[in-house]
Amino acid sequence: MTNKPSTPEPEVLEPPQCWELLRGVPVGRLAVWVEDHPDIFPINYKVDHGTLVFRTGEGTKLYSALGETPVALEADGVNPDTGVAWSVVVKGQAVAIKLTQEVLDTVGLLLFPWQAGRKDHFIRVVPTSITGRRFTVTPPLTWRSPLDDATRAGLE
């Protein structure tokens, strides 16, 4: 029998909780497939009726996101007062917003790029799945693994 402290299981979040958390942070990471490898781009986005909308300019992010391969967006956060963190992943297909009325509707989202330059393309990520979890951040002094003991023994 060991006196090993138990590790609390992360809380699995329901989709409405995930959407609420996504509304509370302005930046996520968009994962796309570029030719023969994955790539990740930071984006600022807005939640819009069960989808995510972002703006971008011409380039790798735009062309890769609109390809046949699905995309993923990950966003997370931590409450420094409580030590509770969360992470949400949205997977789905990115589609260009081209209809004039749809583009005008996105203007109401107040989606302004953080980086200067032309960001004329509005992209909507239509989810096929949304998953999330919430967990308590482990204090660094309690991080232990068998490798810690092996490293310490090698130094003695």
Image (tube, rainbow, N blue to C red):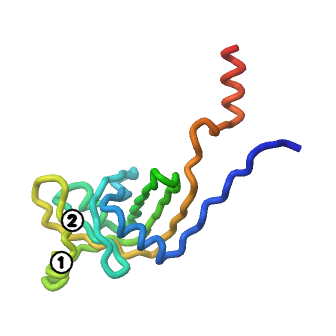
Across and down, in percent, residue 4 comes to: 77, 43
Rendered view: 132 above or below 140? below
Label 1 sits on a secondary structure element that is loop
Label 2 sits on what residue type? Arg
Query: Residue at point 45% right, 51% down?
Result: 80
Query: Residue at point 69% right, 51% down?
Result: 7
Across and down, in percent, residue 128 comes to: 45, 75
Across and down, in percent, residue 62 comes to: 24, 61
Q: Residue furthest right?
A: 1
Across and down, in percent, residue 113 comes to: 18, 60
Label 1 sits on what residue type? Gly
Cα separation between marks 1 and 2: 13 Å
Residue 108, which numbered label? 1
Quadrant (top left, top right, bottom left, bottom right) of the N terminus: top right
Disc with the residue nearer the chain's start (1 vs 2): 2
Q: Residue furthest front?
A: 81
Disc 1 versus disc 2: nearer the observer: 1
Circle 2 residue? 55
Left or right: 75 in relation to 103: right
